[in-house]
Amino acid sequence: MNATGRVIAVCTSTSGGIPRYSVATIELTQQGIVGDKHRYLEHETNERAVSLFDVELYDQLTIDDEPAPPGSVGENITVAGIRLGQLVEGAEVQLGEVIVRLTRRWAPCYAQHPLTGKTRPNREKLTGWFAMVIQAGEVAAHDMVTLSTNSSQNH
């Protein structure tokens, strides 16, 4: 398993829900992303402060025969190279200057293309993670992603 990767996109929504839209930088606090909204009150917890999704999964999640772009499943941070699916609850991931702890697997219900509005269900049950913020700060596309030791299922 790769121990390093890159942030591909950081995404927010001022109205909540799916999709989220790519922005240059996000600021994470223990309460979540500054300026990002949630559609449902139960999503507003510290344990679900941020959501992560592998960019590689978008190859399987196509809309009109094209991979959906980052933010299409509502994730806040799209990463490459670290294989989130192999990580375990409690794993800590450093994203630039920010450190998050994975708290719960998350299977988005559907994907919605941020430009066309077209949707498709997540029939494959592709998953990402919800995470809590351990060390606050800013995250941007191209930031390095690293895993703490003992973060994978196959130690």
Image (tube, helix red, strand yellow):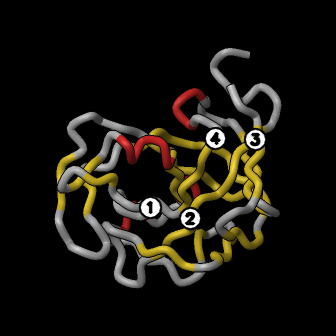
Mark 1 — residue? Answer: 70
Q: Position of residue 44 (x, y in %)?
A: 46, 66
Given the image, on which type of amino acid does mark 4 rest?
Gly
Earlier in the chain: of badge 3 and badge 2, it is 3
Using the image, tell me which numbered label, if any, was put on residue 81: 4
Earlier in the chain: of badge 4 and badge 3, it is 3
- The answer to whether marks 1 and 3 mark residues whose Cβ atoms lie closer than 8 Å is no
Earlier in the chain: of badge 4 and badge 1, it is 1
Q: CA distance from mark 3 to mark 2?
A: 16 Å
Mark 2 — residue? Answer: 9
Q: Nearer the viewer, residue 81 or 127?
A: 81
Earlier in the chain: of badge 1 and badge 3, it is 3
Q: Quadrant of residue 69?
A: bottom left
Q: Residue at x 30, y 46 (%)?
A: 61
Instruction: Relative to 65, say whether 104 is above or below.
Output: above
Q: Position of residue 82 (x, y in %)?
A: 64, 38
